[in-house]
Structure formats: C-alpha cells, structure tokens
Image (spheres, rainbow, N blue to C red):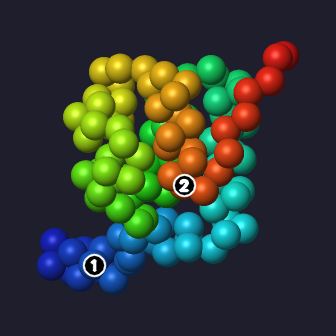
C-alpha cells in the first residue's frame, strides 16, 4: 500500500484523545476510569501516575490554565506534576479530585 492510501486510511480513524474524551462524557465510564486509576494507585503507590490518569478527565472540559484557575493550583505546578517533576501534595490531590466532582477520602490501612 502506498503512502497516500495509508494516510487516507489512517485519517478515517478517530483520534484516540477525541475518542477518549467522548467516552468520558458518560458518568458511568468516568466512574470506571477513576476507580481503575485508584486501583492502579493502590498497586503502584505512584501519585504522579494517578494524577496523569486523571488528566483526560481534566482535558475533556478544561485547558490546563482553566483548570488551574478552577482549582487554585498554579498552572506551572500542574505542568510540573504532569511532567513528573514534582509529586503533588494531599492538598493538591484533594483540589484536583474536588474540581472533577469527587471526594478524596483517606483512611488508615
């Protein structure tokens, strides 16, 4: 298959980010996504990976700058979290979950 045909064929497939954002419009799928992210966190204890898994939920409705304003988290801090330069505090995690419509609850294991 030549390059033109390959490009035409590839262009007929939806962009993954667009597909994911449309799927995450469904409340049930959003809940499954968040629960899966929390399960992964309970296995790995990787806070940055948890926040990175929440990023599609953020990007579905906001730019990073808009989300920073909504949460009161500086946008540079969000960029650093998403690029693994800093680990978010519990306060920042709480702000992120709250802005997405979830309550973050901690318990003693």
Of pointers 2 and 1, the one earlier in the residue sequence: 1
- Residue 2 visible? The answer is no
Say which mark, if any, is on residue 103. none
Q: Position of residue 15 (x, y in %)?
A: 36, 70
Splitting the image into 4 quarters, where does residue 73 fall?
Answer: top left
Q: Secondary structure at mark 1?
A: helix
Left or right of 63 in this view: 40? right
- The image position of residue 29, as x and y in percent, is 67, 65
Which of the numbered marks, if any, corresponds to residue 11?
1
Q: Is residue 46 left or right of residue 69?
A: right
In which quadrant of the rendered image does the N terminus lie? bottom left
Task: State whether residue 8 is above or below residue 90.
Answer: below
Which type of secondary structure does the marked residue at label 2 adopt?
A: loop
Mark 2 or 1: in front is: 2
Quadrant location of residue 27? bottom right
**64 lies left or right of 50:** left
Q: Which residue is mark 2?
A: 100
Residue name at image x 63 percent, y 74 percent: 26
- Residue at x-position 38% and y-position 77%: 13
**Rendered position, 67 above or below 4:** above
Q: Position of residue 67 (x, y in %)?
A: 36, 53
How much space separates mark 2 and mark 1, taking CA atoms?
A: 32 Å
Q: Is residue 12 visible?
A: yes
The image quadrant where one finds the C terminus is top right
Q: Position of residue 97 (x, y in %)?
A: 57, 45
User: Is 82 above or below relative to 103?
Assistant: above
């Amino acid at each position: 298959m030549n390059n033109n045909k390959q490009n035409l064929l590839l262009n007929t497939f939806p962009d993954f980010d667009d597909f994911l954002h449309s799927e995450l419009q469904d409340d049930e799928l959003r809940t499954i996504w968040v629960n899966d992210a929390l399960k992964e966190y309970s296995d790995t204890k990787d806070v940055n990976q948890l926040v990175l898994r929440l990023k599609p939920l953020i990007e579905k409705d906001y730019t990073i700058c808009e989300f920073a304003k909504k949460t009161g988290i500086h946008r540079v801090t969000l960029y650093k979290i998403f690029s693994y330069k800093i680990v978010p505090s519990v306060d920042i995690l709480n702000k992120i979950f709250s802005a997405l419509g979830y309550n973050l609850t901690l318990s003693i294991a």
